[in-house]
């Protein structure tokens, strides 16, 4: 995708967002919210639908926002699927190249002979040196193991049980291998949880004229939490990228250290 195409795409998205948001200036405004507490009525104010607006317009606008959100979610899933396919394809090619290089190195080491024509190869020479080094290291290790075994009883049981179990290690390997898939999956699920309940409440409020007035205080509080759910998507998205994307995490570390 060229730079010009990227700029045109961003410009089109901004213009489309402005066009979709303009009806909010005429359909929504300040609405009174009466709250009853200890035989007292407290009047609060909230951003809601204007009373003198047609319910058909509110319903049509709410459905339009819902369809726009669904299109955005499907586009998000499609783009992430393409990115995942490219990532896995590059990873498979990289693994094949590394495997081919290792095989070539082993063949070169196995076919290299001494100048006098003997069958004593460089690989065997390296193996002999490695064996001698390993023998001396094993002697030092055995002496160290005696000391460790003598002091092992002094280590608290809580510390010994902190070692990762096999299940945890398997989960860590799976998360590291499929971290991009998990990251994109969580972002898509979070988008659905954040936006779809809000649009459902908007449609319910446009169809039922006194929808918000009939709710109890507890129900109103729960519905308002879902109505403001888009804030959750804005706050949690950077955290998901920070956990799963190593490049993003290293960039954040460099930025914090620089400041």
Image (spheres, rainbow, N blue to C red):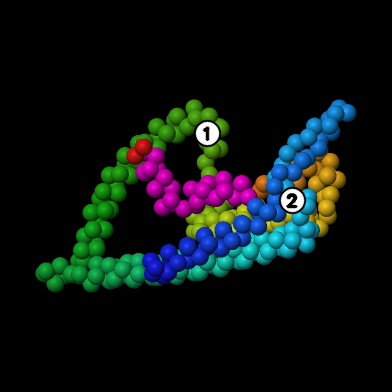
* Residue furthest to the front: 52
Which residue is at the front of the view, 101 or 38? 38
Q: Quadrant of the N terminus?
A: bottom left
- Residue 143 % position (x, y): 35, 36
Quarter occupied by residue 114: bottom left
Specify the principal SS of the magenta part.
helix
Which residue is at the front of the view, 244 or 232? 232
Identify the element where label 1 is drawn: helix
Q: Which residue is mark 2?
A: 49
Q: Is residue 41 left or right of residue 100?
A: right
Q: Is residue 246 left or right of residue 111?
A: right
Quarter occupied by residue 41: top right
Q: Is residue 218 magenta?
A: no
Residue 77 visible in the picture: no
Q: Residue at x 36, y 43 (%)?
A: 254
Q: Residue at x 40, y 32 (%)?
A: 147
Which mark is drawn over residue 241?
none
Q: Residues within 10 Å of mark 2 (few under 14, many from 20)?
A: many
Q: Which residue is mark 1?
A: 159
Identify the element where label 2 is drawn: strand
- Residue 40 % position (x, y): 85, 29
Magenta span of residues = 230-257
Q: Quadrant of the C terminus?
A: top left
Residue 211 visible in the picture: yes
Distance Cα–Cα, label 1 vs label 2? 60 Å
Q: Residue at x 53, y 44 (%)?
A: 164
């Amino acid at each position: 995708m060229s730079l010009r195409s990227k700029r045109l795409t961003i410009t089109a998205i901004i213009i489309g967002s402005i066009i979709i948001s303009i009806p909010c200036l005429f359909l929504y405004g300040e609405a009174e919210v009466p709250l009853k507490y200890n035989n007292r009525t407290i009047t609060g104010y909230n951003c809601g639908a204007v009373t003198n607006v047609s319910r058909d317009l509110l319903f049509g606008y709410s459905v339009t926002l819902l369809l726009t959100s669904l299109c955005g979610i499907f586009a998000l899933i499609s783009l992430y699927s393409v990115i995942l396919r490219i990532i896995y394809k590059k990873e498979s090619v990289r693994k094949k190249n590394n495997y081919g290089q290792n095989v070539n190195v082993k063949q070169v080491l196995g076919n290299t002979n001494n100048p006098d024509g003997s069958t004593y190869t460089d690989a065997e020479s390296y193996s002999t040196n490695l064996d001698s080094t390993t023998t001396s290291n094993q002697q030092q290790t055995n002496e160290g193991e005696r000391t460790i075994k003598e002091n092992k009883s002094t280590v608290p049981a809580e510390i010994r049980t902190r070692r990762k179990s096999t299940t945890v290690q398997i989960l860590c390997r799976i998360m590291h291998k499929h971290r991009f898939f998990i990251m994109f999956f969580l972002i898509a699920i979070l988008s659905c949880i954040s936006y779809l309940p809000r649009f459902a409440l908007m449609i319910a409020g446009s169809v039922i004229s006194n929808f918000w007035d009939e709710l109890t205080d507890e129900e109103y509080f729960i519905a308002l939490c879902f109505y403001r759910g888009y804030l959750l998507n804005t706050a949690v998205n950077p955290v998901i990228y920070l956990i799963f994307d190593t490049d993003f995490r290293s960039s954040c570390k460099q930025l914090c250290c620089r400041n």
